[in-house]
Image: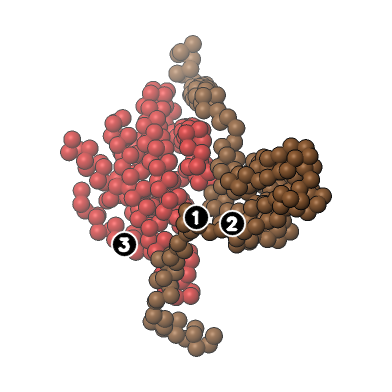
Chain colours: A red, B brown
Amino acid sequence: MQEFAVILISAIFVNNFVLVQFLGLCPFMGVSSKLETAIGMAGATTFVLTIAAMSSYMVNTWILIPLNLEYLKTISFILVIAVVVQFTKMFIEKSSPLLYRVLGVFLPLITTNCAVLGVALQNTTKAHTLSQSTLYGFGAAIGFSLVLILFSAMRERLTVADVPEPFKGAAIAMITAGLMSLAFMGFSGLV
Amino acid sequence: MYDIIIQNPLYSALLALAGLSVIFGGILGFAAIKFKVVGDPIIEQIDSLLPQTQCGQCGYPGCKPYAQAIADGDTINKCPPGGQATINAIADLLDVDAPSLNSEHGEESDTRTIAYIREDECIGCTKCIQACPVDAILGAAKLMHTVIVSECTGCDLCVDPCPVDCIDMLPVQKGLSDWKWNLPSSVGEQLLASKPSGIIASDRSGANTR
């Protein structure tokens, strides 16, 4: 039980994929200008990341390792992630057209979200079991969602804030992200 | 057979990737049938935002066809009855910038009007009944016509066909039931208005040079 808590806290705070490992920065900057879209993106990424981490583990352990094909893991994981994303896209299109309209552009982006591939590859290097892999993926997704939602809330406030002319727009967003990253360094050494 | 595959890394690699692709393709194929979207729900959503006057001022026969046209990529600023509020709502739904109303298709009027038939002058020609898109005009041939007030959308389409010009567009009287309190300006605007200027040095220098 304690081991699971350690994995979760490590993935969410200490080794946060966006602010500490700098993976998945593209959706972090791209989808964070509105809180509503950020929450939708966070939900979709959470779902995709958890399922992708689990299925990548299964593909790796049950197909690649018995056949001595570990060198194929990158391409196999990309295949797995693409299928999970496509499946999620179909599911959302059917179940929530409004969410689909909001996320339509960004859903394919999850395919190339390097945090997803990063989780799958780290699971193999850290020799996680199935439950550990799933939990690590889930924790990474929660960490991603947390910083994405926090960041989008800040950016919504920044639009009405009195920002000096040269820093308006993307510049102040980058600075904010950097400061958040500094803040997350405070978690290092927690586990 | 199994031995050959295990012994030969090339075969096993090809087989593994091909097998994975076939399985995943099967899953996606199944999902494509299972989660098939019937119709385009976005058309329904746009249609629900349009004012449903069915006036045809946009150049399409009604609100649903215009919603279809918007979904196919037409501009969203062709609806005078809806005015800027409708344009903003559709722009928000489609996540595009809100253009201002295209004046080619008519002006947005502040007061809502409905048709009124001066019944003494009506000759009972039924031409306005055929023109009305929402069937708000009652009457028969050679008998006086009248407008059902609650059904009339104020689209002006019955005014032109009338041969004796007995139809007036009258403003709706504001009563207690449809009087609206003006919304206060948003919090962001209030903040901007009340904010002391010139706290930051670059703002002061910018204000001086401006």
Three-letter amino acid code at disc 2? Val
Kindly identify which residue carries mark 2.
Answer: B172
**Percent from the top left, x then y, of residue B201?**
41, 83
Q: Is residue B155 above or below residue A49?
A: below
Identify the residue position indicated by label 1 in the image. B178
The residue under the point 37% across, 61% down is: A154
Q: Identify the residue at image location x=65%, y=42%.
A: B136
Q: Is residue B149 left or right of residue A80?
A: right
Residue B131 at x, y = what percent? 74, 43
Q: Is residue B49 above or below residue B9?
A: below
> Mark 1 or mark 2: which comes first in sequence?
2
Tell me where residue A173 appears, x and y as whole percent.
Answer: 43, 63
Q: Secondary structure at mark 3?
A: helix
Q: Which chain hosts label 2?
A: B
The one of A130 and B120 positioned closer to us in this rendering: B120
User: For the view shown, which residue lies furthest in the top direction?
Assistant: B1
- Identify residue for label 3: A182
User: Residue A56: where, in percent of width, then height?
Assistant: 40, 32
Q: CA distance from mark 1 to mark 2?
A: 10 Å
- The answer to whether marks 1 and 3 sit on the same chain is no
- CB contact under 8 Å: marks 1 and 2: yes
Helix, strand or loop under label 2: loop
Q: Is residue A131 left or right of residue A30?
A: left
Number of the label disc, if any, that sits on residue A46: none
Q: Which amino acid type is shown beneath numbered disc 3? A: Leu
